Image (tube, grey):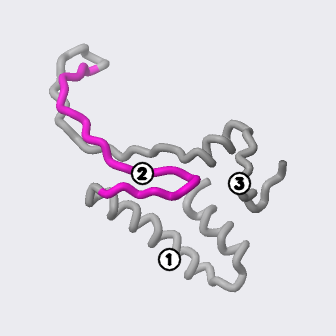
Amino acid sequence: MIRSELIQKIADENPHLTHRHVERLVNTVFDEIIEALARGDRVELRGFGAFSVKARDARIGRNPRTGESVAVRSKKVPFFKTGKLLRDRLNGHDTGGPEFEGEDD
């Protein structure tokens, strides 16, 4: 699913909201997650997962084409850890929690 499909699905399920309002809402959520990660904060969405930032140390890598050693700088990378509810759902386990809407089980 891409962003536009998510916006369309939410708009279809909430006819009292205009497409423009739904788009603004989705963009705001994503923007806030990005801003929090840029500050080094952790973003946790219970049942879904947690976004955080991990630091990667500088290292010596290899150019796969030439085999030449290349210095790779340290960097920060986004990291996502799934929540228990999402993991259980993906693995077909009944979590005993509230059911997801639109479930076809």
Q: Is residue 79 above or below residue 19?
A: above
Which numbered dot is residue 24?
1
Instruction: State the extent of the magenta-drawn residues as a range.
Output: 41-63
Residue 10 x %, y %:
65, 70
Taking the spot 23% from the left edge, 22% from the top edge, the residue there is 61
Location of residue 24 in the rendering, given as x and y in whole percent from the top left corner: 50, 77
Between the residue at mark 2 and the residue at mark 1, the CA separation in whole angstroms equals: 21 Å
The residue identified by callout 2 is 51
Mark 3, residue position: 97
Distance Cα–Cα, label 1 vs label 3: 30 Å
Q: Secondary structure under badge 3?
A: loop
Estimate the x, y position of residue 42 in percent, counting from the top left.
36, 55
2 vs 1, front mark: 2
- What amino acid is found at the position of numbered circle 1 in the picture? Arg
Viewer-nearest of discs 2 and 3: 3
| Mark closest to the chain's N terminus, 1 or 3 | 1
